[in-house]
């Protein structure tokens, strides 16, 4: 058999849908043909979830990645004795936050030690993480801290739509102040390299304006003229194929039509709303969300791919969560590991 990268998968928040979507994804035999999936977390949580869902699989607890079986029907778990008490689905609590946090830190350590070829993260609850005493605003910031990374960005991917953000988890008022030339240039470069790593041979990148109509030549703001346009000019001088500033209300439609290979959004919702409009599908009949987008952290010394949805406490423990985004995350991690 050809090389199968070892993919470390964090279990996520035990009170959410993370363990469920992992187990559902690993019911797909074809994933084992292309990688060696290793869940990092508390094996007892995975066993309980498997019992609740009625999955006929073996939870195989290991102390080292080399001890995994990595065959369909067996879910290998790098066991961390990190969860105390009983799992309470849909509840914000410190015990779940601590378990989720410890699994993230351990998977980062293993990736830095070259024991894993890539990592995939299941959703966490920020409030639970904070209750456990770990004051990070999300996965991205945890990875950046524990890898010593200063220049990083979030990339959302759904089919041909690739969206990177200049700012993410800050207030809208603060985001406007953080739209600066150097940061914009930084994310353009990160996006260009990511597109190449995902197989795009000559990336064409669009940069959004911050203001309505990209300010209409200064009528609605000055950020385009002072920060965004100078960043675009320098990016072009550096050899990047960049268009902009493009009014954000048309940029994403053009990208979905194939006109752009990647889009630079200025703030969280500017990029997330159009992305989730195409990557999320609400099933009103079954009262659940079908999610097919993934989140890739760029700039890290390790590969990190994540589902682009939350812990879904409202449906946790009911067995109705969709594993589509988890399957896609694993597939993207495999693709990136093979090209790395």
Image (cartoon, rainbow, N blue to C red):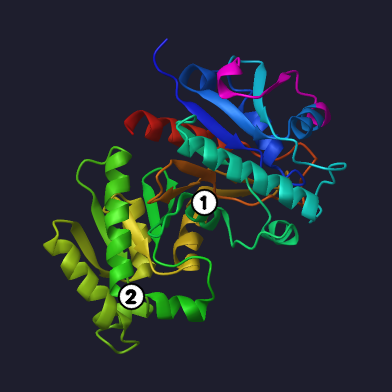
Q: Which mark is residue 213?
A: none
Q: In the rendered structure, does residue 118 fall within the stretch colored magenta?
A: no
Give SS at disc 2: loop
Nearer the observer, 131 or 181: 131
Q: Residues within 10 Å of mark 2 (few under 14, many from 20)?
A: some
Disc 1 to disc 2, how far (Cα)?
26 Å
Name above or below for residue 158 compared with residue 255.
above
Q: Is residue 324 above or below residue 312?
A: above
- Residue 106: give x, y in percent of width and height: 60, 40
The residue positioned 64% from the left and 41% from the top of the image is 103
Asked if residue 139 lies left or right of residue 266, the reply is right
Percent across and percent down for residue 61 are 70, 23
- Crowding at dot 1, Cα within 10 Å, few <14 / some 14-19 / many 20+, comes out as few
Q: Is residue 103 visible?
A: yes
On whether residue 61 falls in the magenta region, the answer is: yes
Say which of marks 1 and 2 sits in front: 1
Quarter placement of the C terminus: top left
- Where residue 301 sits, quadrant-wise, is top left
Residue at 43% across, 41% down: 302
Please tell me which residue lies in front, 301 or 334.
Answer: 301
Q: Residue furthest bottom?
A: 219
The residue that disc 2 covers is 180
What is the secondary structure assignment of the residue under circle 1? helix
Does 40 appear above or below 27? below
Read off the magenta span: 51-69
Residue 146, numbered circle: 1
Question: Measured from the top left, where is residue 92 in percent x and y?
Answer: 79, 56
Q: Quadrant of residue 245?
A: bottom left
Residue 23 located left or right of residue 216:
right
């Amino acid at each position: 058999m050809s090389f199968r990268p070892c993919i470390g998968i964090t279990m996520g928040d035990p009170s959410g849908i993370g363990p469920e979507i992992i187990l559902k994804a690993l019911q797909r035999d074809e994933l084992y043909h292309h990688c060696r999936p290793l869940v990092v977390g508390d094996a007892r949580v995975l066993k309980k979830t498997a019992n609740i869902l009625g999955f006929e699989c073996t939870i195989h607890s290991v102390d080292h990645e080399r001890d995994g079986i990595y065959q369909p029907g067996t879910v290998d778990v790098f066991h961390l004795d990190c969860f105390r008490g009983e799992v309470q689905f849909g509840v914000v609590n410190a015990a779940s936050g601590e378990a989720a946090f410890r699994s993230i830190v351990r998977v980062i350590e293993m990736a830095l030690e070259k024991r894993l070829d890539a990592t995939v993260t299941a959703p966490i609850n920020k409030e639970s993480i904070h209750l456990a005493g770990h004051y990070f605003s999300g996965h991205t910031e945890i990875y950046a801290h524990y890898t010593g990374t200063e220049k990083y960005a979030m990339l959302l991917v759904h089919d041909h739509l690739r969206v990177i953000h200049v700012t993410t988890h800050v207030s809208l008022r603060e985001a406007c102040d953080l739209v600066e030339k150097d940061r914009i240039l930084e994310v353009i470069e990160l996006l260009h390299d990511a597109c190449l790593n995902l197989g795009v041979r000559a990336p064409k990148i669009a940069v959004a304006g911050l203001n309505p109509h990209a300010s209409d030549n200064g009528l609605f703001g000055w950020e385009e003229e002072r920060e965004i346009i100078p960043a675009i000019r320098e990016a072009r001088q550096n050899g990047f194929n960049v268009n902009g500033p493009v009014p954000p209300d048309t940029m994403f439609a053009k990208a979905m039509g194939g006109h752009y290979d990647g889009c630079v959004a200025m703030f969280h919702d500017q990029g997330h709303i159009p992305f989730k409009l195409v990557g999320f599908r609400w099933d009103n009949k079954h009262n659940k969300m079908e999610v097919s987008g993934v989140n890739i952290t760029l700039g890290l010394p390790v590969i990190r791919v994540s589902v682009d949805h939350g812990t879904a406490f409202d449906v946790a423990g009911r067995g109705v969560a969709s594993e589509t985004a988890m399957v896609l995350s694993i597939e993207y991690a495999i693709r990136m590991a093979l090209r790395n």
